[in-house]
Structure formats: structure tokens, C-alpha cells
């Protein structure tokens, strides 16, 4: 399957591809059927199943995918495409150019990343377009709102009033932001926003038609964020989900990004370093970092303590996800790669799918969380999934994720904007 991409990158014109005989997994309709997908001009032009062949034109390239599985490509919401953090001072954090991190993500089947911490916005997307840089499409928040404590980031804005929050959001919109990120924590960097400032930020984001994501560290904060109408909540505070939060979530139906894998990444690597031998981590993570993460004894004491706290909270976070799912929450997969130690660009979104399945989601729910559920946050217009007219951003798997969710890592091919990606070239 490595030969699929040969001669089929920039030199191949768009609209010259047909995926033939694959099992098509559509998380929108929740159906699995054998059929063909015809791609033209970066979009799905037609889908035929059940033996029907209504080819709209003679494709230049036809891929025989019998025995393989096609589904929408993955999205990763809430990353920092700048580095990999490390658990020991002896090995410095790996600083990445965004192009580099975006290539790693695309290698792993992630076609879009929402970066919540970089200050550069529209110019990065324009650079990708003008230079035809191969990699996952980057969406930027461009603005981080926090409470009275400065975060020390060029794109962070401390806002204390409704009017200040509103002005900050509208200025970010004018500069080309794709979303607004609010750090509404009671403790730690930034502290929390006042209720007035939070309401102002959410109202301004609505006027600007920008999605707004809010990170919380308590259920009290989560309650006001959900009631306020935020598009997505990031994080799972300790303890059971309170009844008032459940009622508000049932009414408002916000997106929820639990980041289960990131919240226990160090604990998992300490308990099972073999996770790093998976088909994606072993090729996407710098060898020095792999070696360091395989040796928990070399980690800083504070990092080992954090790993133990993660382990102690893991069961409660899992129960919180089960509660939110029972209440009809729209879960969205996010790896926190670059933000959390032990979370890696490309590989960790697949670990998040494993954790969501373990938390009680069905396989269809997991696939939806990692593909279509992020659409509103990424401002992706319908249609979606494997529908006619949907973007031709797809992955081809060698084995079914219904047999094992780990099979999402068994990537035979990635198709981005209608083109077959040369995955090996992404690693050069």
C-alpha cells in the first residue's frame, strides 16, 4: 500500500481518484457497506454501494481497496503545534515548527488541527496555501482570554469586564481568528473570568460567528460555561458530574472535549511504556523522547507525582464521561498534544479513541468524536461524512476499527483535499 502515493501528490490533478471496493464506514449514517467513492475537485462526487456502479466520469487513478476500510479522516481539537514537552530537564522539550507538527498529524490521518495557543492566525493558513505545504490544515484561536493573571503569551488577554472581553473577541475576529479560547480556571495560570466577562466573550463570539471553547477546572465553572452557551467545554473536573451540570448539558448540548488520554498520559506511560512501540509513536516521536518516556525513573520527581495523581483521578474521569454520554453529550476527540506531557502530535488522537471506547462509548460514537463531531468548532459546513459533496478528507485502514479500535493506527492511506498523500514524504 505504500506505493499508492507514488506520482499522486502535487503532480496529480484533483478529481482523478476512485476508491473501489472498500468497506465504507460512515459515522453520519452509522452504516457500513461495500462500495466505491469517486473524488473530484477535492470533494466526494458520488458514492455507490450494493454493487451499483454509476461512475460520473473516467477517473485517472483507480485504487482497488477490497478488504480495506474507508472512513472520514480525523480531527484533533485543542493542541499546541509548537513542541513536545518532556518530563526531565536533561532532555529539552522538542521545539517544532508548525509545518513539522502538521506533517506528523497528517501522517497519522489527522487532516485538521485546532491550535489553541499560537498567536499567529491567518498568515499561517495563507502560508500553507501559497507554498502548497503538505500537512494537516491548521485552525488557530489567535486569542486566549483569561482572568486577572497574565499568561505571559503574546496572544493572551486578561479581561476583567464584559466590554473588555467583547472588544478582545471582535478584534480577534477582524484579524482572522478561527475560534476563541477561554481559560476559565479557579486555580493556576490566568485564574478565572468574571461571569460578566465570560458572558461578554460568548455574546461577542456569537456576533462574530466564531466558535468559543472554554477550559474549566471545576464543575461550578463548567455549569456557568454550559449555561452561558459556549460551543465546547474542555476538561473534566474531579468528582461526579453534578445534577445541575447534567441538566444544563441536556438542555444546551455543548460539545465536550474530555481529553481522557492526555489526562492520564504520564500514568499510562509509567505503567506501560510498550505503548510507545505502536505503529505511529515509534515513527513520529523523536528517539530521544521515546527513550526518556520509556524510563520513568529518569523523570523529575514532580512529574512522577503528577503521574500518580493522574492514575488516582482516572476512574472518576471515566465515570464522568459515561455520565455525559448517557445525557447525550456530543463528545469531541482532542489529544492536547504539545500541551500535555506524554501527548504526541499524530499518535495521541488514536490513544484518545481507545480511552473513549473504554469509557463506554460505542465504536460509532468514538469514530464520530474523532471525525464529524468537531465540524462546528472547525467551521466545517455540511455535508459531512461520506456524503456526496463532502470534503474528500479520508483515511484507508488495513483492518476494521470494529474489531479493535487500535486498528485506526493501521493506516494504509490518507486522502487530503482529494489527493492521495505521500505519507513517507511527510517524514523527510
Image: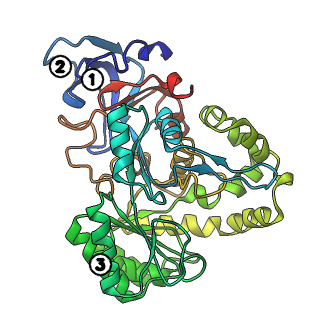
Secondary structure of the residue carrying numbered label 3: helix
Q: Are marks 1 and 2 in contact (CB under 8 Å)?
A: yes
- Badge number at residue 359: none
Q: Earlier in the sequence, mark 3 or mark 2?
A: 2
Q: Residue at the right extreme?
A: 297
Mark 1, other Cα within 10 Å: few <14 / some 14–19 / many ≥20: many
Q: Earlier in the sequence, mark 1 or mark 3?
A: 1
Q: Which residue is mark 3?
A: 166
Q: Compute the Cα span from label 3 to label 2.
A: 54 Å
Q: Compute the Cα span from label 1 to label 3.
A: 49 Å
Q: Quadrant of the C terminus?
A: top right
Residue mark closest to the camera, 3 vs 2: 3
Residue mark closest to the camera, 1 vs 3: 3
Q: Is residue 87 left or right of residue 133?
A: right
Q: Can I make out residue 118 in this image?
A: yes
The residue shown at (22%, 13%) is: 59
Q: Earlier in the sequence, mark 1 or mark 2?
A: 1
Seen from the viewer's position, the closer of residues 260 and 418 is 418
Secondary structure of the residue carrying numbered label 2: loop
Q: Which residue is mark 2?
A: 52
Seen from the viewer's position, the closer of residues 386 and 361 is 386
Colouring rule applied to residues: rainbow
Secondary structure of the residue carrying numbered label 1: strand
The residue shown at (20%, 71%) is: 207
Q: Is residue 264 left or right of residue 208?
A: right
Q: Is residue 322 above or below residue 136?
A: below
Q: Which residue is mark 1?
A: 35
Q: Is residue 202 above or below residue 386?
A: below
Amino acid at each position: 500500500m505504500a506505493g499508492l502515493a507514488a506520482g499522486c501528490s502535487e503532480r496529480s490533478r484533483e478529481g482523478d481518484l476512485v476508491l473501489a471496493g472498500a468497506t465504507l464506514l460512515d459515522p453520519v449514517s452509522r452504516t457500513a457497506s461495500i462500495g466505491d467513492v469517486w473524488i473530484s475537485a477535492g470533494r466526494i462526487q458520488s458514492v455507490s454501494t450494493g454493487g451499483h456502479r454509476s461512475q460520473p466520469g473516467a477517473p485517472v487513478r483507480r485504487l482497488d481497496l477490497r478488504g480495506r476500510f474507508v472512513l472520514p479522516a480525523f480531527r484533533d481539537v485543542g493542541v499546541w503545534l509548537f513542541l513536545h514537552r518532556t518530563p526531565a530537564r536533561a532532555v529539552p522539550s522538542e521545539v517544532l515548527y508548525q509545518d513539522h507538527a502538521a506533517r506528523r498529524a497528517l501522517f497519522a490521518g489527522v487532516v485538521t488541527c485546532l491550535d489553541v495557543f499560537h498567536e499567529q492566525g491567518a498568515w499561517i493558513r495563507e502560508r500553507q496555501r501559497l507554498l502548497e505545504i503538505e500537512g494537516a490544515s491548521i485552525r488557530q484561536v489567535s486569542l486566549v482570554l483569561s482572568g486577572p493573571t497574565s499568561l505571559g503569551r503574546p496572544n493572551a488577554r486578561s479581561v476583567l469586564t464584559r466590554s473588555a472581553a467583547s472588544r478582545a473577541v471582535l478584534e480577534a475576529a477582524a484579524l482572522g481568528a478561527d475560534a476563541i479560547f477561554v481559560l476559565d480556571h479557579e486555580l493556576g495560570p490566568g485564574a478565572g473570568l468574571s461571569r460578566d466577562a465570560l458572558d461578554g466573550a460568548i455574546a461577542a463570539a456569537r456576533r462574530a460567528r466564531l466558535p468559543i471553547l472554554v477550559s474549566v477546572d471545576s464543575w461550578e465553572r463548567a455549569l456557568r460555561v454550559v449555561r452561558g452557551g459556549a460551543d465546547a467545554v474542555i476538561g473534566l473536573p474531579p468528582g461526579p458530574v453534578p445534577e445541575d451540570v447534567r441538566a444544563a448539558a441536556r438542555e444546551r448540548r455543548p460539545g465536550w472535549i474530555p481529553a481522557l488520554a492526555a489526562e492520564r498520559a504520564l500514568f499510562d506511560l509509567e505503567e506501560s511504556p510498550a505503548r510507545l512501540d505502536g505503529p505511529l509513536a515509534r515513527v513520529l516521536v523523536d528517539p530521544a523522547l521515546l527513550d526518556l518516556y520509556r524510563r520513568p525513573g529518569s523523570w523529575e520527581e514532580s512529574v512522577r507525582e503528577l503521574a500518580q495523581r493522574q492514575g488516582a483521578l482516572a476512574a472518576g474521569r471515566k465515570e464522568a464521561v459515561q455520565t455525559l454520554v448517557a445525557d447525550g453529550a456530543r463528545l469531541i476527540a482532542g489529544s492536547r498534544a504539545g500541551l500535555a506531557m506524554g501527548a504526541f502530535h499524530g499518535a495521541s488522537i488514536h490513544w484518545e479513541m481507545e480511552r473513549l471506547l473504554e469509557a463506554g462509548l460505542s465504536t460509532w460514537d468514538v469514530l464520530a468524536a474523532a471525525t464529524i463531531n468537531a465540524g462546528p468548532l472547525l467551521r466545517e459546513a455540511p455535508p459531512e461524512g461520506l456524503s456526496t459533496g463532502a470534503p474528500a478528507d479520508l483515511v484507508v485502514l488495513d483492518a476494521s476499527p470494529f474489531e479493535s479500535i487500535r486498528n485506526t493506527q493501521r493506516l494504509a492511506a490518507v486522502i487530503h483535499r482529494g489527493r492521495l498523500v505521500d505519507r513517507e514524504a511527510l517524514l523527510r
